[in-house]
Amino acid sequence: MIARIVAALLGWLSLASPVAAPAVLAPALWVARDADTTIWLFGTVHQLRPRTPWLSGAVADAFAGSDTLVLEIVEPSPDEMAAAVVQVTPPRPAPLPGELDRRLRARAAELGFPRNAFDATAPWFAATVLAAQPLAQAGYRSDPAPETLLTTLAERSGKPVTAFETLGQQLGIFAALPQGAQRTMLERTLAERDPVPAMDRVVATWGRGDMATLDRLLGEDMAEAGPAVRTALLDRRNAAWAKTIAGWMDRPGTRFVAVGAGHLTGPGSVQERLRARGVEVKRVR
């Protein structure tokens, strides 16, 4: 069962929902540079419908001219994902309250899973998979999205691919969320009967490079998730990544950093934290 559903996990990790987009896309791009170092910052969504044209113009040029691709995690295989999920799953997950358990079983059945599919999993895992399943049914996939496509192109050209985190570290962030926060995540997923229209707005906004609107949409999502989720999934990671990127400014070379768009919007974004460290970051127009 785990092998069947773990691939859906990647859709939530950026907190940027994968959705339909305009015919021609121009996502936002930023750059930090000095005499011998260039760092491109590109916000992604983790799934798109096939034949969504987003790699063009300044983004394509920046990637082509980079020495290294940097992602949140190196894209895992389904077997690697399954093994990592097993590693962070508690041997005896705490039972859900009766009504929440009933709703989870009913929703699992509606989406084509066995009613008991999530009996031995943590709430964050059930929420993640159930949130991603309607998107998969609507045609959203990871292969046309930035991380997968950029990885494929980098490997073809011999460009190194590195990452800020390991898969185990990233899943561990979810697993370490307080039980209350995990249950809130699950309750929100179960309450959203059709997530696709809301997701459509996010990717269409991402594709226009409209960061003010994207900040509002993702900010609302984070506010509903609660402060514990924001701290764990955004704030701590943004701070760690900004520290690493600032260190790269002392080394010559060109890196193309592609991370979830939620990390590059709003207060506490990676760009804001870099500026606080004295690194000038500019939006590419």
Image (spheres, helix red, strand yellow):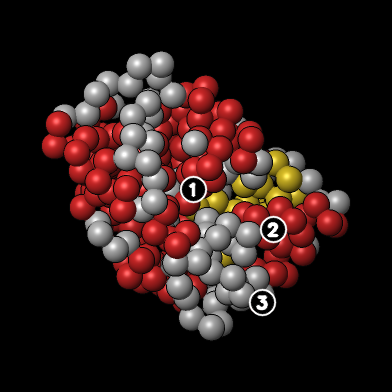
* Residue under label 1: 8
Closer-to-camera residue (68/35): 68
Task: Name the side, left or right, on which 151 lies relative to 137.
Answer: right
| Residue at the extreme top of the image, as rendered | 91
Element under disc 2: helix
Callout 2 amino acid: Leu
Q: Is residue 145 visible?
A: yes
* Residue 144: x %, y % from top left: 62, 64
Callout 3 amino acid: Gly
Element under disc 1: helix
Work out whether mark 2 precedes mark 3 in sequence or the reverse, and give the earlier one: 3
Work out whether mark 1 precedes mark 2 in sequence or the reverse, and give the earlier one: 1
Name which residue lies at 56% across and 29% down: 84
Q: Would you place residue 146 above or below residue 82 in this image?
A: below
Callout 1 amino acid: Ala
* Residue 139: x %, y % from top left: 50, 66
